[in-house]
Image (cartoon, rainbow, N blue to C red):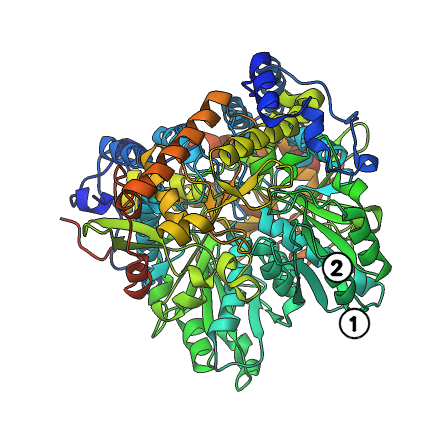
Amino acid sequence: MLIFEQSRQGRRAQAQSPGHADEVTDIPENLLRNESPLMPEVSEMQAVRHYTRLSQKNFSIDTQFYPLGSCTMKYNPRACNSLAMLPGFLARHPCAPEGMGQGFLACMYELQEMLREVTGMPAVSLTPAAGAQGEFAGVAMIRAYHDARGDSVRSEILVPDAAHGTNPATATMCGYKVREIPTDRQGDVDLAALREAVGPQTAGIMLTNPSTLGVFERRIEEIAAVIHEAGGLLYYDGANLNAILGKVRPGDMGFDVIHMNLHKTFSTPHGGGGPGAGPVGVSKRLEPFLPVPIVGYDGDEYYWITEDVRPQSIGRLSAFMGNAGVLMRAYIYARMLGREGMHRVADFATLNANYLMVRLARAGFDLAFPERRATHEFIVTLRRQQKELGITAMDFAKRLLDYNMHAPTTYFPLLVPECLLIEPTETESKEDLDAFVEAMVQIQKEAETSPELLKEAPHTQPVRRLDEVRAAKHLDLAWTGTVA
Amino acid sequence: MPFIPHTDSDIREMLATIGAGDIEDLFDEIPEGLRYGELSGVPEGMTEQEITRLMMERAEADGRPLCFMGAGAYDHHIPAAVWQITTRGEFYSAYTPYQAEASQGTLQLIYEYQTMMAGLTGLDVSNASMYDGASALAEAALMAVRGNRKSKSRRILVPTTVHPAYRKTTRTIVDNQDIELVEVPYCSEGGNTVPDSLKHFEGEDITALVIQHPNFFGILEEVDELTDWAHRQGALVIAIVNPTSLALLKPPGKWGESGADIACGEGQPLGVPLAAGGPYFGFMCCKQALVRQMPGRIVGRTVDRDGRDGYTLTLQAREQHIRRSKATSNICTNQGLLVTAATIYMSLLGADGLARVARACHASTRALVEKLTENEYVEPLFNRPCFHETALRFSLPLADVMRPLFAHNLLPGYDLSTDYPELGNALLVCATETRTAADIELYADHLNRIISAQTVAGCPVKPKMA
């Protein structure tokens, strides 16, 4: 039931708004609202109960195994939340002077420094509000760099066909044409095709490494050389940084610009789809173009570096400094991990993924790249099940929900038919991984003996499979009833 | 090993299953020359107790000043229930609701949010949110260019009464797409955008007109005249509005003859703490005809195979994961957790509660202005009606007044001189419902004492009212 359907005219949570408020007399009549907007009219307890009950209709990391590939659904430490929400931090107005926020700015500066170190990039800006905004900032900097050199014939960004959809969308937003580069049978970028595609029109390439296929791009140094020789720049999509944290650095691989997804690698909450944070790191030659503000430190005080002293900056990406509270959570997480803990992230994310991959392969599931090591994730393809049994990746995914496990990512990357992209993360125990294997084996048996169990799954959720075609055809995007 | 559950025997068994000697072997596809093991710039790890101590010291140091600053971020009361429920693990640690059946909580909440935002703005539909108000304006500008098929110019009029940071952000984001942002000056007496100042654009191809209302100075714009003018030119109208104000003010959907086409703005006043500027959320609503041009996630109501109501992401064919380079935007996330907070906030306030907050803020700011302008060196800057925020002119150097107020742990307002040097010593002030009469009294006392010290003791500055 919707909150509006529980509403009764005239009911409200009286403790939550001023008891007395003078009527407004100095605003012209024609600018005033003449009817009340549709909003809930409920007591405080009704609101609390309603939203608590809604929360219980969600799967989450705190309640379920959540092996969603490419999303790094690891445990979000509770301390990161409670400490980022200390009253002294929440009370800080974004335009308050630097002198009244040295504690906050110290955290931001130290986060910048740690991110520089783990990525091997000489300069970092924390301001992009999400991965996609970090991508935008990165490609906008590539463009600003070429433009500043008077090199404006570069009109193309290369993107591997396995890339996340935000990569080509971002290139378009920055005014570039997109050229796709095919992948070879082993999951690496097709080097011959790449060599053919580069030229004076190449502004750069956007790469994820490990790629979205769950494998490490082994010829990354050759790729970097090909692009750099053509005068292009390399953009690193940090979606999969969790796989290599403390093992290998994008800066050392030859990348010129990178974004990180702190909501993945640095364990800030996904929040049902945001907020994220997508800091960018750059090589020395791109530093003048970094988005502002950036935090500076003169050995005594922390201060903002703004467009006044960075005239070549691509500019601002949000009204203030981006998702400060997310950055605080990432900072706290990084300090708790420390140097040793960061190495362990990649170690155990990789151990878990390889263990799960081997066990699923032995249980009879087909791997997309059986000769390759898993990175922090890997791909199972259900093409055989689809052909032989008419059971799709979607059916498996929906049936997993009945086993009280979130489904892996399905139908991405687009290259592998009927794929499940599986990322267990380092915070899952061996028992949880074993339970997932058991569930998959059980579902495979069901697929052979009673496929309707899969076809009609899920059976245990608040709703059964939804009519998405109807949702798009008969748009119902807001409730239009009246409050009783 | 914080947050890693593996025992030594787990590790041994897992490596044996894989057939690897040790964990390092699992990285054997990474070229040897690239391996890096130092991380010397990262300090040693800390226990929860240690990091708690450090963060409490830093939070304490930041002082929690008494805030009379607005400028796009407002210090409102937030009911305790809002963040207690929002940070429940089931909301906090869930991902984007791609598996709809296992995400009905988030999805239904977004549908309720969309309903409330459509109601507040008086428009047909809302999306599931953008990063913040400034980036929402940038996306609204791109949306207007896609949506206004009759206009070929890609020219958008942006009054200088629009938040300076919103204008900068929009410039950054649309810069590489051949879109021209044309600034429109404001009236120096009224602090508003005068419809007459648009006259010389008549007959030209204009894609959209942006109207911020109340504008950055807190001043109310002549929204009906401006909207009708834009529509007569064939331009779309993009409204930037403060959601608190909409409990009292005519919603964008009712501006002029046919209403604004797109409304966007900063959602922070709806239950989101100031928190150094984020995470906040941008909202975006539009007329039904433009829904397929809208960026970002949208939730729709549908039915499951048993005919029960259920909620799902819809119109995904607009989005980057389907359309790739032809998507309406590269945006992937929304600000889900903030939308959760805002939805609970709006449910606890209701229309009546939100109107009470709006009236209390407005009265509070009026009381502040009356009190501060009792001093002969301070006067209102503009002569037109405002809502809950307005600018004051000081007839002595503002920086010299502000510095000692900071020292009293008070944020006196937003200094307009950087963004609007032509205004001289101008301060944008705001007192929300959380500022009491005693707070306002305290501000005025400090200010009077500071001004009299600077005007009497040795260095007299004459009051010179323009």
The nearer-to-camera label among 2 and 1 is 2
Do pointers 2 and 1 mark residues of a single chain?
yes
Which residue corresponds to the image point at 71% horizontal and 26% vertical from the top-left? Answer: B24
Q: Is residue B312 left or right of residue A295?
A: left
Amino acid marked by disc 1: Val
The residue marked by circle 1 belongs to what chain? A
Depicted B239 relative to depicted A437: above or below: below
Which residue corresponds to the image point at 33% horizontal and 66% vertical from the top-left? Answer: B254
Task: Report if residue A119 is visible in the image.
Answer: yes
Q: Position of residue B300 (x, y in %)?
A: 32, 55
Depicted A199 relative to depicted B389: above or below: below
- Of helix, strand and loop, which one carries label 2? strand
Q: Residues within 10 Å of mark 2 (few under 14, many from 20)?
A: many
Q: Is residue A195 left or right of residue A83?
A: right
Image mark for residue A430: none
The residue marked by circle 2 belongs to what chain? A
Tell me how far mark 2 sits from mark 1, CA to CA: 12 Å
Q: Is residue B355 left or right of residue B76?
A: left
Q: Quadrant of the N terminus of chain A?
A: top left
Image mark for residue A153: 1
Marks 2 and 1: CB-CB under 8 Å? Answer: no
Q: Position of residue A124 (x, y in %)?
A: 73, 41
Depicted B214 relative to depicted B154: above or below: above
**Going from the N terminus, do you reach mark 2 or mark 1 first?**
1
Image mark for residue A204: 2
Q: Is residue B43 left or right of residue A396?
A: right
